[in-house]
Amino acid sequence: MSNNGRSSPDILEQRSRRPSARVRDSRLRMRALLLVLGAMTTGVGTVATAQSGSYAPHGSTKRQTQTTPRIAPAVESPVVTFAPTRLDGSSSIQLITTPPLTTLGTELISSIRKTHREFNALFGGITDIHNTLRLIDAEEFYAVTHLPTWTNAMFFRKQVVIPIDRSKPIDRMELERSLRHEYFHAITHSLSAGRCPGWLDEGLAQHIEGIPQEGLWRALAGWLGNNDMVPFERLARGFTKLPSEMVAPAYAQSLVAARMVRSQFGMGAVRAFLEQLKSGAQVESSFLHAFGIPATAFHKRVEENLRSGKFQQGDFG
């Protein structure tokens, strides 16, 4: 997930046999999101062939009967489900959207084809990755997920979900940044079976966007003036539950750490780390195996960089 887009929140985390109020609320949010996304797939709609643009009726016109209390508003408008678009490496991406957003959606699918090709080269070949791009009404997105409003895109269960506010002009540059960011999460999720630590996942996704968001380094410097760096243990679990004042510094710190990883070890080592995680190995042993140093030692390197202010001069060596 990104603060202008970025990783799927781990909203099913349970630390005890009796769920806390936070966990119960998180479960409700997940059920709500699944309901609205399910409605986008099974409600009134059409299926389209992405390559030809031809349409055929698809789906039932009857609304599903809910046997549980209603958590999310029903999706009343029709949806358009496109046939999967082939990508390099026997991969694919499928578009699901509403009729007013089909043109935008097909343009974004074209962007994903280029982005996938770039990421395929970056990681030295990626195969059999199949995801969905969903464009959803912004008001509905925030209503059912209760995610913070700085979240303007997310990756969730092999789905890049982007809320679109059609009452405002669309900032295509920011939209493309969000798309790159979320699709990078799709790649790391596949390579690691969803086990990539949040700080590395978010940091690399920001790095791949391009120029950092304005004010990010300033926010981090301000935070470090009064606090220790954000513990990596907290960053490993994702950012959606962080206090609001910690969010920008967390993204910035993760970006610094990720740039250091790429500069010092390279993307080949990153892939090795992700594949170790996918095999079931522990994070600490995977980190040592892929990067040659303990994770705690690397965290200290990051802290030294942060305290020296080198990151503000672009020094990530």
Image (cartoon, rainbow, N blue to C red):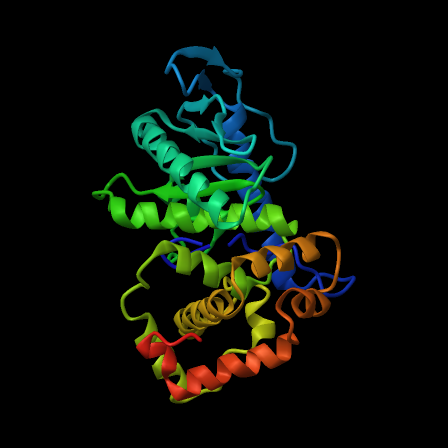
Query: Residue visible at 45% across and 54% down?
Result: 6
Which is more toward the observer, 158 or 35? 158
Question: Which quadrant holds residue 298?
Answer: bottom right
Residue 89 x %, y %: 55, 34
Residue 28 x %, y %: 59, 49
Q: How many marks?
A: 0
Above or below residue 135? Residue 231 is below
Question: Which quadrant holds residue 52?
Answer: top left
Which is more toward the observer, 270 or 72? 270
Above or below residue 228? Residue 152 is above
Above or below residue 47? Residue 228 is below
Above or below residue 317? Residue 126 is above
Question: Which quadrant holds residue 249?
Answer: bottom left
Which is more toward the observer, 314 or 55? 314
Residue 229 appears in view: no
Residue 52 appears in view: yes
Farthest-out residue, left? 169
Quarter of the image with the C terminus is bottom left
Residue 191 x %, y %: 61, 48
Query: Residue visible at 54% across and 47% down?
Result: 124
Residue 217 x %, y %: 33, 74
Which is more toward the observer, 261 or 108? 261
Horizontal relation, residue 167 to residue 81: left or right: left
